[in-house]
Image (spheres, rainbow, N blue to C red):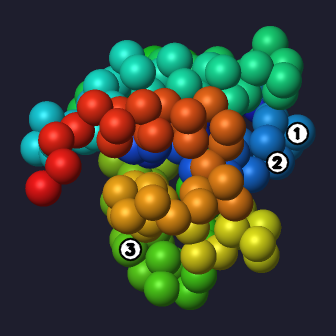
């Protein structure tokens, strides 16, 4: 039996915490699809196409069993489309658990055949979030510990093109 998992998120942008979870999930499953959510209610810094491309660059060394795809709608529908029996979610701290548990239970109700697997991010990335990394970068701080190199470079380029206030 092939174990297929999806790792969904907005990834705006992908952080080292996300990459840590993806790297470890890639060793647990026969196929891992990183799902980049195209959420029309949010105004992301990077387009869904840009996010997919950046993530592809970040996970290129994980193997051909790892892929990246954009999606909209329910995560369980995305999982079913890819034949996944698992949804991977990363946890940074206890504070993440309540919202993630509610989402996992909802997904379980919608699709009982799909299980959610939680992976704790590595200790050194427990504080990292996409919004925090963008904020640090906006004020000229060092984001190297927070972001993979391709993402840090793209973020610097994007911020350099924004008008200064």
Q: Secondary structure at mark 2?
A: helix
In the image, is residue 86 above or below residue 49? below
Kindly report the distance in space between the C-alpha atoms of the residues bearing marks 3 and 1.
26 Å
Residue at 66% across / 21% down in the picture? 57
Q: Are marks 2 and 1 in contact (CB under 8 Å)?
A: yes
Kindly identify the residue that appears in the image at 51 percent across and 64 percent down.
Answer: 141
Earlier-in-chain disc, 3 versus 1: 1
| Residue 99 disc label | 3
- Which of the 4 image quarters holds residue 55? top right
Cβ atoms at labels 3 and 1 below 8 Å apart:
no
Pointer 2 residue: 24
The answer to whether residue 33 shows anywhere in this view is: no
Outermost residue toward the top?
64
Residue farthest along the front direction in this orientation: 164
Query: Which x, y percent locates residue 24?
Result: 82, 48
- The quadrant holding residue 2 is top right
Dot 3: element: helix
């Amino acid at each position: 039996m092939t174990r297929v998992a999806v790792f969904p998120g907005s990834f705006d942008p992908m952080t080292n915490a996300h990459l840590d979870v993806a790297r470890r999930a890639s060793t647990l499953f026969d196929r891992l699809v990183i799902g980049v959510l195209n959420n029309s209610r949010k105004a992301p810094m990077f387009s869904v196409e840009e996010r997919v491309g950046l993530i592809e660059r970040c996970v290129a060394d994980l193997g051909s069993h790892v892929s990246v795809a954009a999606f909209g709608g329910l995560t369980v529908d995305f999982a079913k489309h890819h034949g996944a029996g698992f949804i991977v979610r990363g946890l940074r701290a206890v504070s993440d658990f309540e919202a993630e548990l509610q989402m996992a239970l909802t997904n379980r109700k919608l699709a009982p055949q799909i299980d959610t697997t939680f992976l704790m991010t590595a200790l050194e990335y427990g504080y990292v979030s996409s919004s925090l990394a963008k904020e640090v970068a906006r004020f000229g701080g060092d984001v190297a510990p927070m972001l993979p190199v391709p993402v840090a470079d793209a973020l610097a380029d994007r911020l350099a093109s924004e008008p200064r206030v």
